Amino acid sequence: MKYRIALLAAATSAALLIAPAVHAKPFKWASAGEISTWDIHSQNNALQNGIHAAVYESLVYYNSRTFKVEPMLATSWTLVQPNQLRVTLREGVKFHDGSAMTADDVVFSLTRAMAKTSNFTPYVVGFDRIVKVNDNQVDIFTKGPNPVLLNQLTELRIMSKAWAEKNNSVEPKDIKNVNQETFANRNAMGTGPYMLKQWVPDQRMVLAKNPNWWGQAETNVTEIIYTPIKSEATRVAALLSGEIDLLLDPSPQDLPRLRNSGNLKVVDGVENRTIFFGLDQHRDELPGSNIKGKNPLKDERVRRALYQAIDSDALHRVTMRGLSQPTGTLVAPQVTGWTEGVHKRLPYDTEAAKKLLAEAGYPQGFEVDFACPNNRYINDEEICQAVTAMWSRIGVKAKLRTMPLVTYFPMIQRHEASIYMLGWGVPTFDALYSLQSLTRTPGAGGDGNYNVGRYSNQRMDYIVDRVKVETDLPVRNRLLTEGLQLSNDTVSHIPLHNQIIPWAMKKNVEVVHRADNRIDWRLVKVN
């Protein structure tokens, strides 16, 4: 069965264009993390992308209730030929400064996502060029058939070309360069239902309702106020006291108290995000290790030993308090390519791990740098502390250091960690997104853009490159599963678990819980 992009012509009155709710109100929310930039192509992480989506819009987006792709800034699209998608734009859309959105802005924004400093290259995989047909249509040319093109477009948001040119923001900010400052890094010019009103990093972010938005949303929220709060106790206290309306990441240990509170409710859902460890498989010698002249992590037996020394059941039961799904692969069950077979973990076995280390030439273990975020994933620091203790039982002395996500992600992208934690959601719901970003040998066009351990395998590269253009769905799915299994067999990474996400909120708040752990701001109501 050959893959075909379905042709869709949707009326401009999309499902979300319904009568707005009354009694407009502000909405206050919090989580542990902070975003690192307002540049829509500079850094790719889910928290940031979800916040950006309130201000910047994409051509298409996932319906929060069905997770099917639906029109947004595009109203229809037609496959002219296998490598040419013609997109018709919504008319009457204006940027927040009142200027009209046209095909020029779309061509500029999609091309900008392909820039060298962009971290959004996984979403432009296979793109060749973007061409203006007229003021209301663009053609997206790909290097070959692209089975997930529409899914990729959900994360490619549109920026004003004139605004970017005026403010010297044509190129995305290089997130790895801590000293670089650009106008788009601190400011925003989108078409979305909310406008950036204020941003004081690590303190407060305020979004104001866009009175000239093209759509009519269900929300009655006029102002969104976000406060990053690192301390778990302080976040929970803010919710219990009524200071905030919603807490995106309540700690597992606080959930019973929140569920039993008469004024609050907790909404749970499985996230399409997998938590794992990456390992430096590139350097010939690991900085800070007591092993000189070689890199233990290059040895598959060592990686397997570290994997088998982790008691995932204990992490699930004690550290995560049940809010996890232990896994042996890099993607969650919602993702194409996942099977029960690749999901199965290697057994927890400290004696087998010690034997593998001895066979690899490290009977006494070794010292290694270990880096983790402390405000990005559920109990991220606690997980790493627990794993550090588990590794010590086989003689591996992991020197743990933790830091906030704003500094953590640029650090690991500079290859400054020997072992690192990463959580990888899959916005396309297709394993190519993970395999290409995490396991493909780093190269051009998004290949290995988050393969910061620099794992390299010729068969994996072949699989990824083949899947990029394979249109026979059964064949493509088998290749995706083979790639995931190859990752397992070679221990490209050490998978831990898929996250189960609870949102805690006041009882008068209505939201739609999404598998990508982002709030759809068009659907939030405060009653």
Image: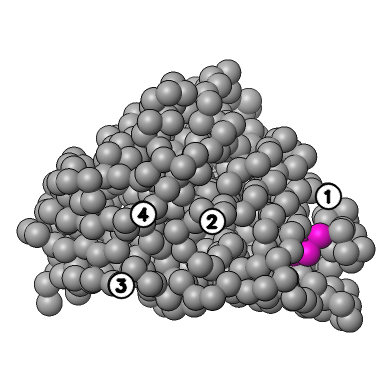
How far separated are the C-alphas under marks 2 and 1? 31 Å
- Seen in the picture, residue 289 relative to 481 is either above or below; the reply is above
How many C-alpha atoms fall within 10 Å of the one at disc 1: few (<14), some, or many (≥20)?
A: few
- Nearer to us: label 2 or label 4: 4
Looking at the rendering, the stretch of residues picked out in magenta corresponds to 244-248
Mark 2 or mark 4, earlier in chain:
4
Report the predominant secondary structure element of the magenta stretch.
Answer: loop
- Which residue, given by chain and number where applicable, does mark 4 sit on? 92
Q: Quadrant of the N terminus?
A: bottom left
Q: Nearer the viewer, residue 109 or 166?
A: 166
- Report which quarter residue 313 is drawn in: bottom right
User: Do the numbered discs 2 and 4 sit on residues whose CB atoms are within 8 Å?
Assistant: no
Badge 2 element: loop
- Name the kind of residue labelled 4 in the image: Gly
Mark 2 or mark 3, earlier in chain:
3
Mark 1 or mark 3, earlier in chain:
3
- Name the kind of residue labelled 3 in the image: Ala
How many C-alpha atoms fall within 10 Å of the one at disc 4: few (<14), some, or many (≥20)?
A: few
